[in-house]
Image: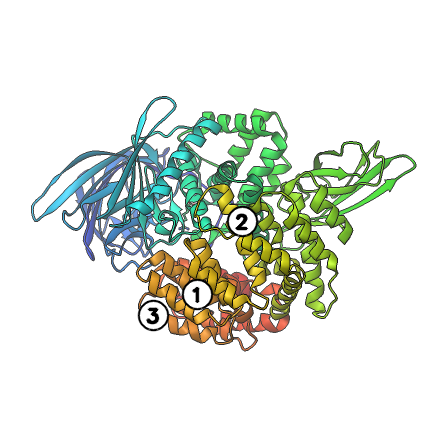
Amino acid sequence: SPRYLKDYQVPDYKISTVDLTIELDDNKTIVTNVMNVIKSGEHQRALVLDGEHMQLKSVLINQTQIDSSQYQLSDSTLSITNLPEQFTLTITTEINPVANTALEGLYKSADVYCTQCEAEGFRRITYFLDRPDVMAVYTTKIIADKTSFPFLLANGNKVEQGNLANNLHYVTWHDPFPKPCYLFALVAGNFDLLSDTFTTTSGREVKLELFVDKGNLSRGEHAMVSLKKSMLWDEQQFNLEYDLDIYMIVAVDFFNMGAMENKGLNVFNSKFVLADDLSATDDDFFNVEAVIAHEYFHNWTGNRVTCRDWFQLSLKEGLTVFRDQQFSADMHSSTVTRIKNVKIVRAQQFAEDAGPMAHPIRPEKVMEMNNFYTLTVYEKGSEVIRMMHTILGDDAFKAGIELYFDRHDGQAVTCDDFVAAMSDASKTDLSQFKLWYSQSGTPELIVSDDYNSATNTYQLTIEQSYPQTHDKQEKQNLHIPINFELITNDNEPNQGGLLHSKEKTQTWTFDNVCSKPLPALLGNFSAPVKLNYHYNDQDLNTLMVDASDEFNRWDAGQKLFAGYIKQLVNNPELDLPLQIASALEQVLACNADNAFKAEQLILPSFDEMAAAIVEVNPGSLVRAITVLKGFIAEQLQVQFLQTYQSLCTSEFAKDGQAIGNRALKNVCLDYLSLLDGANALVLNQFTDANNMTDQLAAIKVAALNDLACFEDVMTEFATQWQGNTLVMDKWFTINALHNNENVVQRITGLLEHPEFSIDNPNRARALIGAFAFYNSEYFHNKDASGYEFLFEQLAKLNTINPQVASRLITPLIQFKSFDNNHQQLMKGQLQKLTKLESLSRDLIEKLDAALK
Ligand code: ARG
Ligand code: ZN
């Protein structure tokens, strides 16, 4: 049964300290939890602790054991009544880390014990008030075999260690900062350790420790450098310093998400730590840096100030994503970084908002919290923070952040508290703006204009429109910041600035406009909305060249492509104008940086287009994109080849320019791979590649175009990289992308591959996820074999790892974007899922939403 935001109540009891002793064992780990509990206010209500998947061994109150007549035990709670005002509660539980394939709570995988407690995993370790507004000071003693587990880690500072009988040893950690239990962490294993230090502006030396699998030390360097950059950036931008004496990061191979910001002890998916020149792509390097930064930034936005309840998740996630995006923009090309952000919002978040799981960035109703670590909470949440930044300006925004910490350091607070700090610090009314927190769906702006050459006035009219969302929510008008520029071809400077759309329909009048202007709107994507204005091709060409905002220039190209893709969906024979090619020829010829050019040349993705077209036939959409791409490739064959060749260098470098060069080169390769001679070109690049970006690009285009060399390069790649799990993930993904009618057979066979294991989330996502999310042609095959395949895997994952299952079901529940035939086939598989025995709460919530 769901929980509701409106039902929030302060906890009946507080827990001020937690003393844990954890005796690690594969199947019988013993957890002794000594808590200081204080009643809040006067009442006689029971203390109801959360607990799941554990065996309760004993309960002591003030050191005296109580028997089972004095408490009540259910599947998910332990209730104790008749309690004094304040007492020591000692609870001992037994858990089975090896059997824990859900990877929530304490689990053991690949010889490492580790924990994942966010959102509600701590209740699988011990009985507790598992909610973020219960904050305690933790002391953690870990006991394990000294040979197998030389490193025993937990939050805070190490205070004691020693040897015990039977080759056991122990380490005790103390974290002085009160924290919610979702930030608790423990790791035990045998690692290689990369050590460094960082001196804060105020002169404190912080030990930095990065733990990786044995033999992987050199692949940790980039993560360590990224951590130091993040620490410096947060001091320079926000005056935020690290607070403990040590900051640890552990890379593990089995992890449900990207990473976790546990206080002083981040646990990372190894995918976001390990990187070296040969085995990681430029994107991998970028992502490692971004995730390292994200988790580091959480130390303030998340840990020092945390969430009152889980409905407030975007308080920490939206804000921290915004901060990591700003960091990446400062470290790299800001426009290209922004384009990457926007593509995720448009392709995936818009789809989520249009699908059955549509929810506001602050959801009001939750059944399984793990289902709400969504693109909406994270990415749209970040866009909402960014809009405040745009509305208030950088200085006022930073003053707001400062006030937020002045007021709330050490507290568990709400999104309202955050907006209040922003509003008070800037003396700006954000009451209408706040509706962004409670309203789901993607707003659409319908724009029209009128120019009067007699009076030199220009009128711009913007209407806010709200498509019905699945939650049937009634929509109100939002406060939408719209960057604009009026592009004129006279000699006057363009007018521009920020419009605040607040009403259903609003008109702005501009004077002294000497010629009919072309409006460039939503510069830098100033709001997460769809824009509807009738630009013709000529307008878009103008914007591509003349808009001052680089994002607008890129976006104009995207609109030009999207318009033709839409037409091609209905008419694949459509005659395409040479103008498209000439616009891109200009892009290739101009002297912008190559990373930006590469983005300008990439067509909108299947997902982005699917989000923009009603009830599309997936096959027609795939073909429409291919036709446009083929047309461009043919028209610009000479230019692509020239550019490609000019960018083939034997030197490998990793600076921004080299990265941009590779990006552009591989976009050219992608176009050229549709033409005669592709096979030789691709084979050549594969053979010559001295880095993963180029090598992967080659096998990817071989797969997407089913080139003659495909099987050979895949075999060679697997031989070269067998045993390297992160690279083999890429190999599994490329298999899943194979554009061939036998792909389902291929991936079904790969489920038996010695290096495949459905228990490993990275592997499951690499093969099953890649197929369902990105092989649009064959996932949506009209014989339903793609859907059937996903059904079978979800049925297994439902019991092995519900969180992974719940992510991978996404392409099936978003059936609304497709034509009725496909909708019926997809729903058929969802119906079958509902009949599974012991369906997880995660899947129940999504299936209910999708089928209701
Ligand atoms: N707080 C983590 C991050 O964004 C994500 C944890 C997600 N956990 C989960 N069970 N869904 O950095
Ligand atoms: Zn986060």
Q: Position of residue 533 (x, y in %)?
A: 75, 49
N-term mark: 3 or 1: 3
Compare marks 1 and 2 and give the one earlier in the sequence.
2
Amino acid type shown at disc 3: His
Does residue 760 appear to the left or right of 333 in the view shown?
Answer: left
Check disc 2 and give the amino acid type. Answer: Thr
The residue indicated by pointer 2 is 376
- Give the residue pinned by disc 1: 768
Q: Is residue 443 above or below residue 769?
A: above
The amino acid pointed to by label 1 is Ile
Q: Using the image, tell me which numbered label, if any, was put on residue 753.
A: 3
Q: Relative to 391, say whether 363 is above or below.
A: below
State how the image is colored.
rainbow
Mark 1 vs mark 2, foreground winner is: 1
Q: Nearer the viewer, residue 361 or 500?
A: 500
Answer few, some or many: residues within 10 Å of disc 1's Cα (few below 14, many 20 plus, some between 14 and 19). many
